[in-house]
Image (cartoon, grey):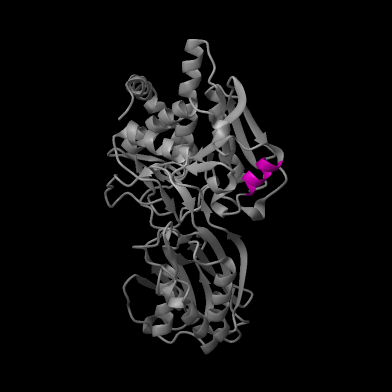
Amino acid sequence: MTEVHDKAFLAEADSWIDAHWEEIVAEIGKLVAVPSVVDWDAATPEHPSGPDAHAGMTAALDLANRLGFEPHDEAGEIGWADLPGESDTQLGMICHADVVVPGVGWTSDPWTMQRRDGFLIGRGVLDDKGPLVLSLYAMKFFAERCEAEDAKLPYTIRMLVGTNEETGTMRDVGYYLAHHKAPAFLFTADAEFSVCYGEKGQFDGIITSKQLEGGSIVDFTTGDAATNAVPSQATLVVRANAADLPAAPSIEIIDEGNGTARIVATGKGGHASLPEGTVNAIALAARYALDNSLCSEDEAAFLRMACQIMDSTDGSSIGIDSVDEYFGHLTCIAGTIHLHEGHLKLTVDVRWPTTTSRADLLEKFQAVAKPCDATVENPLGMEPFLVDPQSPAIQMLASSYHDATGLDGDPFTIGGGTYAREFPCAASFGPEDAHDVYPDWVGPMHGADEGVSEESLRRALRTYILAIKRLMEIDLNSLSK
């Protein structure tokens, strides 16, 4: 049950949120308007994640500055702003300003936030620009409170703004920790409530065909789709007479002239860690080509291998399925495909529990790829991240969620990867909520029409404010011991 003094505190927080809500929504819209996708090819020393991702961080730091916090840009890699406390000991919060590419299927401009029937729609409203704005305003709440009381919080709050979380490299945090001490405790607003105490391991693979000569495939692409999402569209161009090709569900056939046909497959996208219910457009296009004998044997062998991977989302179709008590089942998706200099390149994204290993996954993918003479690379891999779900920090965040919302929820693990895994003492903490039921026209993070309810965001801000208050009342330095 919420303590009596916390009830009064929450009433104060509610009044403050009500007074600031319209400007909060407006600020989320301003950040959404910045197409802050990482572009390594455009990276420079001033813009190490590309100019667009840096622009996203700059926009967030501009907001911090307008709210009264001195902004700091660390070599373009990561930004931060502080609310100084009585102690240099830090309570950290972190969000990322970069987003995944929009993909296809949007019913409105992804960079123009729509406000409709109590929902915000736009790329990043949920992952992670909406939570970023909430975190800055939570800090602003305490700044105004401290000014009114002519006092300081026991600890310094440091708000960190990342630039390349969606790439999986999280080199922004690596740069930061190479130059700064980690906060005594940190939470990232980039998961679900009540609180996440563990994240699956991640295995990113690139499967490359042998040289394909004299085949029928002219191009095969998922455009600028992200490797950590199930693609909603794939385009295959083959040497064939478009008029002779049969119609098929989710397939559009376009005559490209010169004896070529463009096959556009439309599926249902979603985050790589939550593939249930998605429809992979790569598989749709590949199966159409196989069913209609549109490939050479070497091309067909590679596509059959790719389809075998996509025949399941738990890895069972290729023998990598595994499960444990903390994380549940492994997930496996194909994210992108491209034809490059005569080679088809397929990327895979695997989120794995503690019952397998990076080495075992690589070995099994190599076995799957061997019959078609394909090669497998594993440029990025991360071990599972796990902390004790009974630890004081995890239990405190869970109770803060319950007391701020009146909703139940046990600590849990996720398949996604957040900044929490990069810090010695951290957790991921909302803002998604399993209690919410959204209409079909509201899309998921990483999907088309990404959306979040304003009610959910208001509830999250209330929760963050209460959690910060309670974390200020304990010995933060003891949490990592």
Q: Is residue 412 left or right of residue 217?
A: left
Residue at 56 percent of width and 25 percent of height: 155
Quadrant containing the N terminus in the rendered view: top left
Relative to 289, does residue 161 appear above or below in the rendering? above
Q: Position of residue 190 (x, y in %)?
A: 46, 44
| Main secondary structure along the magenta-highlighted residues | helix
Q: Nearer the viewer, residue 371 or 219?
A: 371
Residue at 37 percent of width and 35 percent of height: 399
Residue 212: in sight, yes or no? yes
Q: Where is residue 173 in the image (x, y as percent from the top left)?
A: 62, 44
Relative to 406, does residue 232 appear above or below in the rendering? below
Q: Quadrant of residue 459?
A: top left
Q: Where is residue 392 in the image (x, y as percent from the top left)?
A: 46, 37
Residue 36: in sight, yes or no? no
Relative to 218, does residue 180 appear above or below in the rendering? above
Q: Nearer the viewer, residue 130 or 385?
A: 385
Residue at 52 percent of width and 87 percent of height: 296
Q: Where is residue 312 in the image (x, y as percent from the top left)?
A: 40, 72
Seen from this angle, which residue lies furthest right? 45
| Magenta-highlighted residues | 171-178
* 353 magenta-colored: no
Q: Quadrant of residue 263?
A: bottom left
Quadrant containing the C terminus in the rendered view: top right
Q: In this view, does 437 lie to the left or right of 328?
A: left
